[in-house]
Image: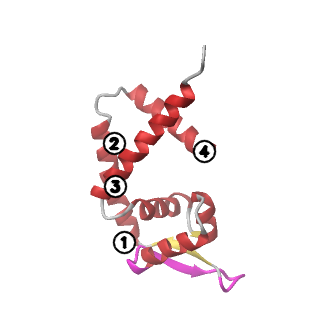
Protein backbone atom coordinates (compact mmCIF):
# COMPACT_ATOMS: atom_id res chain seq x y z
CA UNK A 1 0.00 0.00 0.00
CA UNK A 2 1.36 3.42 -1.00
CA UNK A 3 1.91 6.08 1.69
CA UNK A 4 -0.12 9.06 0.46
CA UNK A 5 0.43 11.06 3.64
CA UNK A 6 3.11 13.25 2.01
CA UNK A 7 0.78 14.09 -0.85
CA UNK A 8 -2.03 14.97 1.56
CA UNK A 9 0.25 17.08 3.77
CA UNK A 10 1.79 18.93 0.81
CA UNK A 11 -1.62 19.77 -0.63
CA UNK A 12 -3.09 20.83 2.71
CA UNK A 13 -0.10 23.10 3.41
CA UNK A 14 -0.55 24.71 -0.02
CA UNK A 15 -4.26 25.28 0.66
CA UNK A 16 -3.56 26.62 4.15
CA UNK A 17 -0.88 28.97 2.82
CA UNK A 18 -3.25 30.31 0.16
CA UNK A 19 -6.06 30.87 2.68
CA UNK A 20 -3.82 32.51 5.26
CA UNK A 21 -2.24 34.84 2.70
CA UNK A 22 -5.64 35.80 1.26
CA UNK A 23 -6.88 36.58 4.76
CA UNK A 24 -3.87 38.69 5.61
CA UNK A 25 -4.12 40.76 2.44
CA UNK A 26 -7.80 41.48 3.04
CA UNK A 27 -7.78 42.04 6.78
CA UNK A 28 -5.28 42.48 9.58
CA UNK A 29 -5.97 41.40 13.11
CA UNK A 30 -4.92 44.33 15.22
CA UNK A 31 -2.63 47.05 13.87
CA UNK A 32 0.33 44.80 13.06
CA UNK A 33 1.08 42.96 9.86
CA UNK A 34 2.46 39.43 10.13
CA UNK A 35 6.14 40.39 10.01
CA UNK A 36 5.74 43.09 12.68
CA UNK A 37 3.72 40.73 14.86
CA UNK A 38 6.33 37.98 14.65
CA UNK A 39 9.28 40.28 15.35
CA UNK A 40 7.57 41.91 18.33
CA UNK A 41 6.45 38.51 19.62
CA UNK A 42 9.99 37.13 19.38
CA UNK A 43 11.43 40.08 21.30
CA UNK A 44 8.65 39.90 23.88
CA UNK A 45 9.02 36.16 24.43
CA UNK A 46 12.82 35.92 24.36
CA UNK A 47 14.07 39.36 25.34
CA UNK A 48 16.01 41.92 23.37
CA UNK A 49 17.53 40.71 20.13
CA UNK A 50 19.84 41.91 17.42
CA UNK A 51 19.02 42.01 13.73
CA UNK A 52 21.27 39.07 12.94
CA UNK A 53 19.63 36.83 15.57
CA UNK A 54 16.16 37.77 14.35
CA UNK A 55 17.14 37.11 10.74
CA UNK A 56 18.46 33.68 11.70
CA UNK A 57 15.34 32.86 13.72
CA UNK A 58 13.00 33.66 10.83
CA UNK A 59 15.37 32.51 8.08
CA UNK A 60 15.35 35.93 6.41
CA UNK A 61 18.02 38.19 4.97
CA UNK A 62 19.52 40.65 7.43
CA UNK A 63 18.49 43.49 5.09
CA UNK A 64 14.85 42.36 5.23
CA UNK A 65 14.78 42.23 9.02
CA UNK A 66 16.64 45.54 9.18
CA UNK A 67 13.93 47.22 7.08
CA UNK A 68 11.19 45.64 9.20
CA UNK A 69 12.92 46.74 12.40
CA UNK A 70 13.32 50.28 11.07
CA UNK A 71 9.58 50.42 10.43
CA UNK A 72 8.89 49.23 13.97
CA UNK A 73 11.29 51.81 15.34
CA UNK A 74 9.62 54.56 13.29
CA UNK A 75 6.27 53.58 14.83
CA UNK A 76 7.94 53.67 18.25
CA UNK A 77 7.24 49.97 18.92
CA UNK A 78 10.93 49.22 19.54
CA UNK A 79 14.06 51.14 20.44
CA UNK A 80 17.73 50.40 19.84
CA UNK A 81 20.35 49.79 22.49
CA UNK A 82 23.93 49.92 21.15
CA UNK A 83 26.15 46.91 21.69
CA UNK A 84 28.99 48.06 23.99
CA UNK A 85 31.44 45.67 22.28
CA UNK A 86 30.53 46.47 18.68
CA UNK A 87 29.59 50.06 17.92
CA UNK A 88 27.84 49.05 14.71
CA UNK A 89 25.55 46.47 16.33
CA UNK A 90 22.53 47.03 18.53
CA UNK A 91 19.71 45.10 20.13
CA UNK A 92 16.03 45.87 19.86
CA UNK A 93 13.81 46.30 22.91
CA UNK A 94 10.04 46.69 23.06
CA UNK A 95 8.56 50.02 24.07
CA UNK A 96 5.38 50.16 26.15
CA UNK A 97 3.54 51.10 22.93
CA UNK A 98 5.04 48.07 21.19
CA UNK A 99 3.93 45.81 24.05
CA UNK A 100 0.43 47.28 23.85
CA UNK A 101 0.15 46.83 20.07
CA UNK A 102 1.48 43.29 20.35
CA UNK A 103 -1.15 42.40 22.94
CA UNK A 104 -3.99 43.93 20.89
CA UNK A 105 -2.90 41.94 17.84
CA UNK A 106 -2.38 38.77 19.85
CA UNK A 107 -5.90 38.98 21.26
CA UNK A 108 -7.42 39.69 17.83
CA UNK A 109 -5.56 36.75 16.26
CA UNK A 110 -6.53 34.40 19.08
CA UNK A 111 -10.16 35.47 18.79
CA UNK A 112 -10.06 34.55 15.09
CA UNK A 113 -8.52 31.15 15.85
CA UNK A 114 -11.17 30.54 18.52
CA UNK A 115 -13.88 31.29 15.94
CA UNK A 116 -12.33 28.93 13.41
CA UNK A 117 -11.88 26.08 15.89
CA UNK A 118 -15.05 26.53 17.93
CA UNK A 119 -16.33 23.06 16.96
CA UNK A 120 -13.04 21.29 17.76
CA UNK A 121 -12.54 19.49 21.04
CA UNK A 122 -9.84 20.62 23.42
CA UNK A 123 -7.95 17.42 22.64
CA UNK A 124 -8.07 18.15 18.89
CA UNK A 125 -6.83 21.72 19.47
CA UNK A 126 -3.99 20.51 21.68
CA UNK A 127 -2.97 17.83 19.14
CA UNK A 128 -3.11 20.33 16.28
CA UNK A 129 -1.05 22.86 18.25
CA UNK A 130 1.53 20.22 19.17
CA UNK A 131 1.82 19.01 15.59
CA UNK A 132 2.12 22.55 14.21
CA UNK A 133 4.83 23.28 16.76
CA UNK A 134 6.68 20.11 15.81
CA UNK A 135 6.32 20.89 12.10
CA UNK A 136 7.62 24.46 12.51
CA UNK A 137 10.58 23.27 14.57
CA UNK A 138 11.46 20.83 11.79
CA UNK A 139 12.50 23.83 9.71
Q: Are marks 3 and 1 in contact (CB under 8 Å)?
A: no
What residue does disc 3 label? Answer: 24
Name the side, left or right, on which 19 lies relative to 41: left
How far apart in space, not on screen, are marks 4 and 2 (Cα)?
A: 21 Å
Disc 1 crowd, CA 10 A, few/some/many (<14, 14-19, 20+) = few
Residue 28 in sight here: no
Q: What secondary structure prevails in the magenta region?
A: loop
In the picture, residue 6 is in which quadrant?
Answer: top right
Which mark lies nearer to you, 4 or 3? 3
Checking the image for residue 97, the label placed there is: 1
Marker disc for residue 113: 2
Q: Marks 3/1: CA distance?
A: 23 Å
Residue at (52, 59) in percent of width and height? 42
Q: SS class of the residue under badge 3?
A: helix
> Badge 2: how crowded within 10 Å, few (<14), some, or many (20+)?
few
Earlier along the polypeptide chain: callout 3 or callout 2? 3
Look at discs 3 and 2 and give the one toward the viewer.
3
Q: Is 126 colored magenta in this rendering?
A: no
Q: Is residue 54 above or below residue 88?
A: above
User: Outermost residue toward the right?
Assistant: 85
Q: Secondary structure at mark 4?
A: helix
Residue 1, label in figure: none
Asked if labels 2 and 3 touch by Cβ distance under 8 angstroms, the answer is no
Q: What's the distance in space between the residues labelled 4 and 1, CA to CA?
A: 30 Å
Count the labels in the image. Answer: 4
**Disc 2 secondary structure class:** helix
Q: Quadrant of residue 104?
A: bottom left
SS under mark 1 = helix
Amino acid sequence: MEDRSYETIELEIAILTRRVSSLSTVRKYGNLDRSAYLLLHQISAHGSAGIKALAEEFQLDISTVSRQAAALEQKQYVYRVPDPLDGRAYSLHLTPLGEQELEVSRQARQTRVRELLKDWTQEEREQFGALLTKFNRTF
